[in-house]
Image (spheres, grey):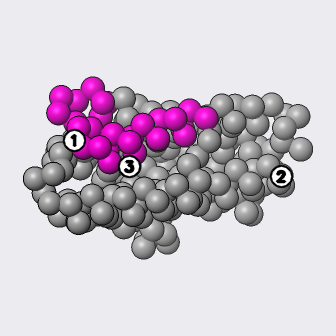
């Protein structure tokens, strides 16, 4: 299950406090891998938002609309939190949501784990009804699985995720994406798409 917006907002406030109000000596400094993870995860989340934007015109199911709304809210909140954390670390904080008119494949430039290719995004953008639902669910499962890979790679990097905020956020991403993958796999059952 994705973290509720209130939890994300609380975490964002805590991160700002940790990054700005606390003396630098009291913090565990962020590793280069932490910064790269947060910057990459912003672009990763942005593609999920691009995918969700297609739901309104392409699905016929309430369950898909509800799933899309949960993903949209949580990913936008997490992007804001990641940008806040990066700025507190005096790092570049990409703002992909300011360019939502971009071509559907633009966020896939870096091809991080799980990112859909331009061809996959184009297929999703032209499908409708149950065909769309199936493509969306398969694509978002792929996408979420990529986020799990990014977390696993972060935790496997020496010196990374020693910063408490990074460790907590990456752990939450792992738990939330696993729960969402399980939900989407269940939705792939045709009985749940009605």
Query: Taken as a whole, is the magenta stretch helix, strand or loop?
Result: helix
| Magenta span includes 69 | no
Q: Secondary structure at mark 3?
A: helix
* Quadrant in which residue 191 is drawn: top right
Image mark for residue 61: 2
Distance from the alpha carbon under mark 3 to that under mark 1: 12 Å
Q: CA distance from mark 1 to mark 2?
A: 40 Å
Tag 1 or tag 3, which sits nearer the N-term?
Answer: 1
The residue to which callout 3 is attached is 41
- Please report the bounds of the magenta region as a residue range: 153-179
Q: Earlier in the sequence, mark 1 or mark 2?
A: 1
Give coordinates of residue 82: x percent, y percent: 36, 57
Disc number lying in front (1 or 2): 1
Q: Residues within 10 Å of mark 3 (few under 14, many from 20)?
A: many
Q: Are marks 2 and 3 in contact (CB under 8 Å)?
A: no
- Badge 2 local density, few (<14 within 10 Å), some, or many (20+)? some
């Amino acid at each position: 299950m994705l973290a509720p917006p209130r939890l994300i907002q609380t975490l964002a406030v805590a991160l700002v406090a940790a990054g700005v109000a606390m003396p630098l000596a009291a913090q565990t400094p962020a590793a280069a891998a932490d910064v790269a993870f947060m910057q990459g995860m912003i672009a990763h989340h942005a593609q999920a938002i691009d995918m969700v934007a297609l739901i309104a015109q392409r699905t016929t199911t309430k369950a898909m609309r509800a799933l899309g709304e949960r993903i949209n809210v949580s990913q936008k909140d997490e992007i804001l939190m990641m940008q806040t954390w990066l700025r507190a670390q005096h790092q570049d904080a990409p703002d992909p949501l300011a360019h939502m008119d971009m071509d559907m494949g633009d966020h896939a430039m870096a091809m991080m784990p799980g990112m859909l290719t331009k061809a996959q995004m184009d297929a999703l953008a032209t499908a409708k009804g149950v065909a769309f639902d199936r493509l969306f669910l398969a694509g978002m499962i792929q996408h979420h699985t990529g986020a799990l890979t990014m977390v696993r790679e972060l935790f496997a990097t020496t010196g990374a995720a020693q910063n408490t905020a990074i460790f907590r956020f990456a752990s939450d991403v792992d738990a939330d994406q696993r729960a969402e993958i399980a939900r989407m796999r269940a939705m792939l059952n045709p009985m749940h798409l009605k």
